[in-house]
Image (spheres, rainbow, N blue to C red):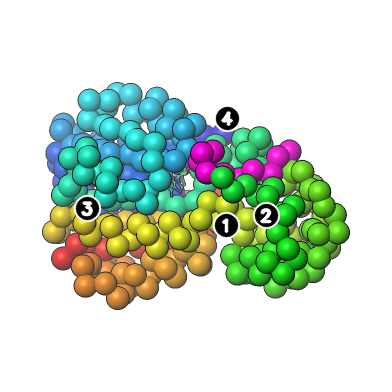
Amino acid sequence: MKSHIPVLLDEVIQALALRVNGTYIDGTLGAGGHAEAILKATAPAGRLLGLDGDPQALDIAKETLAPYQDRVILVRSNFTQIYTVAAAHEFIPADGVLLDLGLSSMQLANLERGFSFLSDSLDMRMDNRSELTASEIVNEYEEKELADLIFKLGEEHASRRIARRIIENRPISSAQELAEVIERAVGRHGKTHPATRTLQALRIAVNHELDNLEVVLPQLAQVVGKGGRAAIITFHSLEDRIVKNFFKTTRDWRNLTKHPIKPSYQQTRENPRARSAKLRVAERL
Ligand SMILES: C[S@@+](CC[C@H](N)C(=O)[O-])C[C@H]1O[C@@H](n2cnc3c(N)ncnc32)[C@H](O)[C@@H]1O
């Protein structure tokens, strides 16, 4: 399976101002790429608590982090539970928290999970214990509800036309079939696949991504001690806006990135997934 290249790795390590023997929480463990770098930099006794809602991610991270196993605790949990999990494992006060939002390359590449245009399913849950799937939204929502969701969460201007065609072509059983319906509805212009924004909207809705972000942000100040850092990587403007506004208005944090840190040209060439990444960093006051 395609391995995941950590995005903005050097930038994250610098942003967290890692302390030797420090205590860190990675709320989106994925393949453990960032986590591994944090553990290396905080040797010999730095500790890391890693959370992910996806059991497949945890299995991969467990292997990646095996050399550090006595300094690592991995928990299957949504990061909306970060305070409870951190308290239970005595990770408060932490010296820093990282959130690297969105999908890993393994999730995207696993066609059974329905995240890619090539997928033969229409699931899109990062955590398979949650109830809502993309199939339910695509095949059961009313036309207006579907159009509004695609417009709001996908920032897709052809949302009404797309919703109409989806309704006409139901039932739709795979992301591949959905992508074809959308391509027939709106045509193909430029390099990006015409279904990209609709798939994004479905994924955000299925995984409650914006709500989760709103829930986790206020908890970070309860978890990170004074002088500690929070580093958050987002991949689309809706998420970035939430993070930006949060750090701008909170009294608990000093915003260290007036403008977000973006990957270099070189990095986006080597890792196309990094293209839309934005890193924001703050220090706990
Ligand atoms: C971009 S990947 C992280 C990659 C990781 N930084 C690395 O270097 O390997 C994002 C991960 O966060 C997980 N995730 C996304 N939203 C989550 C949430 N609300 N709670 C827990 N895990 C979440 C996904 O399942 C995915 O494995």
Q: Nearer the viewer, mark 3 or mark 4?
A: 3
Q: Main secondary structure of the magenta part?
A: loop
Which disc is residue 223 wearing? 3
- Asked whether residue 177 is in view, the answer is yes
- N-terminal of the pair, mark 1 or mark 2, is 2
Which disc is residue 205 wearing? 1
Residue at the spot 45% in from the left edge and 60% down from the top edge: 211
Span of residues in magenta = 119-130
Q: Is residue 73 above or below residue 158?
A: above
Whether the residues at callouts 1 and 2 have beta carbons within 8 Å, the answer is yes
Q: Nearer the viewer, residue 15 or 232?
A: 232
Label 2, ligand 1: CB separation under 8 Å: no
Q: Pinpoint residue 206: horizontal percent, then vertical percent.
A: 57, 52
Identify the residue under disc 2. Answer: 137
Tell whether position 128 is magenta: yes
Image quarter hosting the N terminus: top right
Q: Is residue 180 above or below residue 253?
A: above
Look at the numbered disc 4 and give the secondary structure of its residue: loop
Tell whether position 33 is magenta: no
